[in-house]
Image (cartoon, helix red, strand yellow):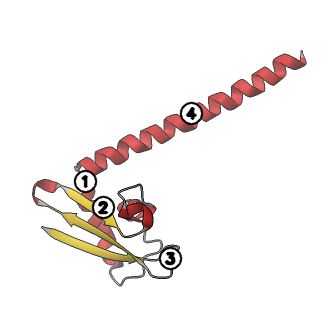
Amino acid sequence: MEEIVFAVQGSAPSPYEVRFVRRDGGNLTASCSCPAGAVGQYCKHRFNLMAGSTEGVVSQNLEQVPLVCEWLAGTDVEAAMDRLAKAELQVADAKRLVSKAKKDLAAAMRD
């Protein structure tokens, strides 16, 4: 088992602790002490680090961010992140379709 811990400055006065644990079999666990992360909800601090961003990191281990990205490869976490990215694209497409439909409806009412 390997572990990397980052201190990330969020909205609270004290930095949050973001912890990544690589377990046997390539399983990756990620936790954050922020209010959302503490209850297992979506937490931008973990996801930013997994995307390679060092935004807000105040600990002296920035060089370990790429290692977290390496640990992510091939895990169920990576698969879930991929599904989220696809769903976000579908939402964006749906918003474009709704916007076009509203414009078409407005145009139809002017005729």
Q: Which residue is mark 2?
A: 69
Residue 8 picture location, percent across and down: 42, 75
Disc 1 crowd, CA 10 A, few/some/many (<14, 14-19, 20+): few
The circle drawn on residue 12 is: 3
Secondary structure beneath label 4: helix
The amino acid pointed to by label 3 is: Ala
Circles 1 and 2, Cβ within 8 Å, touching? The answer is yes
Earlier residue among tags 4 and 1: 1
Circles 4 and 1, Cβ within 8 Å, touching? The answer is no
Disc 3 crowd, CA 10 A, few/some/many (<14, 14-19, 20+): few
The amino acid pointed to by label 4 is: Asp
Earlier residue among tags 3 and 2: 3
Residue 50 picture location, percent across and down: 35, 61
Secondary structure beneath label 3: loop
Secondary structure beneath label 2: helix
Compared with 63, 32 (above or below) is above
Compared with 25, 106 (above or below) is above
Earlier residue among tags 3 and 4: 3
Mark-to-mark CA distance, 4 and 1: 27 Å
Identity of the residue drawn at 34% across and 76% down: 6
Residue 24 picture location, percent across and down: 10, 59
Q: Which residue is mark 1?
A: 73
The circle drawn on residue 62 is: none
Identity of the residue drawn at 21% across and 65% down: 21
Q: Which residue is mark 4?
A: 93
